[in-house]
Image (tube, helix red, strand yellow):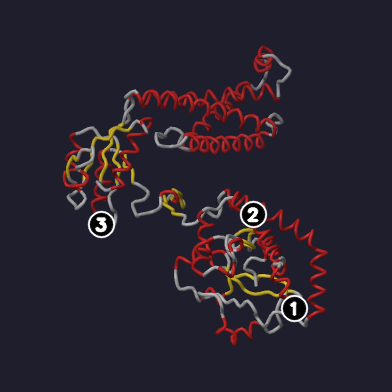
Amino acid sequence: MIPFHRKIFILTLRSFDLLAVVCSLYLTAMQTIFKNHSSDQIIRLFLDSQNKGYQLFYFFAFLMTCHIIFRTSGFYLSKRISSYLRVILDIMKAVLWVCIILFAGNLVLSSEIITSRFIVYFFTTTILFISGGRLFMRCLLYLSRINGRNLRYVVVLGTNKRAIDLARTIIKKKELGFLISGFIDDPWSGLKQFKQTEFKLLGDLQNFREYLRNNIIDEVLVCLPIKSLYEESYEIVSVCEEHGVIVRFASNIFGLNEKKVRHEYIGTQSMITQYNTENIYDMINTSKRILDLFASAMLLLLFTPFFICIGVLIKVTSPGPIFYSQERVGLNKRLFKLYKFRSMVQNAEHLQKNLEGHNEVGGPVFKIKEDPRITPLGRFIRRTSIDELPQLFNVLKGEMSLVGPRPLPIRDFNGFEKDWHRRRFSVLPGLTCLWQINGRNNIEFDQWMALDLKYIDNRSLLLDFKILLLTIPAIIKRTGAS
């Protein structure tokens, strides 16, 4: 049962949101329709209208639609642990739907009042009004909670380190308004260590139902190991549902990395998702793709005359095609054709079998400093990395990025023995990376893979720019190039 003060609070919020919509409509109309009219003139225009009944009907229907959208968007659910940014994003999504409904309704009514300018102005002012109201509300609630009011009594299930750390975080964040009543857990080897903490043990899991019956509990935080206590966790959820008590599960109940976990939905099914590499739709990847498109297109245009010269030299100095293409392993092990200027004789891949015993690099990769298959011109373009320039076409196509782990041939990939090496394929391969600026062929294979993973774990646009800048002196000095 919802407490009376909570009902009043929600009613106030709903009223404020509708008032915000009305004020936004009024200001939008003043700026876009009645810019040169006073308030008295606008009222007289409305009273003189022959369609006052229809206008009132559409107005209240629109307000009701707004209320339904706000309610279904979770506006009036508890936001106690939600960040203000999350609240703003939810407001923006809901107001966007309101604007879509407003625009669609205007198409049906064939009115010339709701213009694109009207929609943009209404969208902006509505977000500002509602967001401002939520900020004011959060400030009031913050002051209330740090002064010991509007508190929620919480019981933590589990006495492991994760549970203790969570409780201590809650105590530090007084603005959440959570009061830790105590912990409940069955006897286990770590219970003796828990008893040395500042927290109180309320009992074991068998007595949880009885404790819930006779004590004030608003929420239950479950930090139990699901693998060994699945049945107990299921029973706890059922008991809390019977009592109408909120249950929260720590997202790292399966040992997941908290920084990589997101809560998402497939239809109506809630999913806990762990991204072991940055999400492919995140802002970093979007920014990288924009940079890749722009830079590769500009560089290809700039280097066109140079490409022609190199192509002519390759054709004149050795028989065979200008470009060399080979299947490489890309994002999530997708195969793609990598392009290079040909720097070896035509049948280089067939000759490699006879040279395997001369490999100078550990691990599955194949490298020889004085490779007899390389042509005289090829040796120059490899040392200066000119042979890699056609890979700008791969970057333009989205198969590669300017910065990323180097794409490896299928032969090298099939030689991987350690699973942690394969995480390098969780991002787009690139023209250059930390390996290139740290010595290339002079680095052991495991160290090379470690550098790739270091890049993946610390990816940022700033790091990409740093690598691109450091690649230039590495090419000039021919550091580790063969």
Nearest the viewer among 73 and 165 is 165
- Give the residue displayed 51% in from the left and 37% down from the top: 90
Residue at (71, 64) in percent of width and height: 393
Q: Is residue 282 above or below residue 34?
A: below
Say whether residue 117 is left or right of residue 68.
right
Mark 2 or 1, nearer chain start: 2
SS state under label 3: loop
Query: Mark 3 packing: few (<14 Cα in 10 Å), some, or many (20+)?
Result: few
Nearer to us: label 2 or label 1? 1
Quickly name the residue at label 1.
376
- Which residue, given by chain and number where applicable, does mark 3 sit on? 228
Q: In the image, what residue type sits under mark 3?
A: Ser
149 in relation to 75, above or below: above
Secondary element under disc 1, as helix, strand or loop, is: helix
Hey, which quadrant is residue 312 in on the image?
Answer: bottom right
Residue type at mark 1 is Pro
**For the C terminus, which image quadrant?**
bottom right
Q: Residues within 10 Å of mark 1 (few under 14, many from 20)?
A: some
Of badges 1 and 3, nearer the viewer stands 1
Give residue 330's position: percent from left, percent from top: 58, 66
Residue 57 picture location, percent across and down: 57, 26
At 60% from the left and 60% from the top, the residue drawn is 433
CA gap between label 2 and label 1 equals: 36 Å
Given residues 333 and 411, the one toward you in this image is 411
Residue type, label 2:
Arg
* Mark number displayed over residue 289: 2
- Which of the two labelled residues, at mark 2 and mark 3, occupies the earlier sequence position? 3
Q: Nearer the viewer, residue 23 or 353?
A: 353
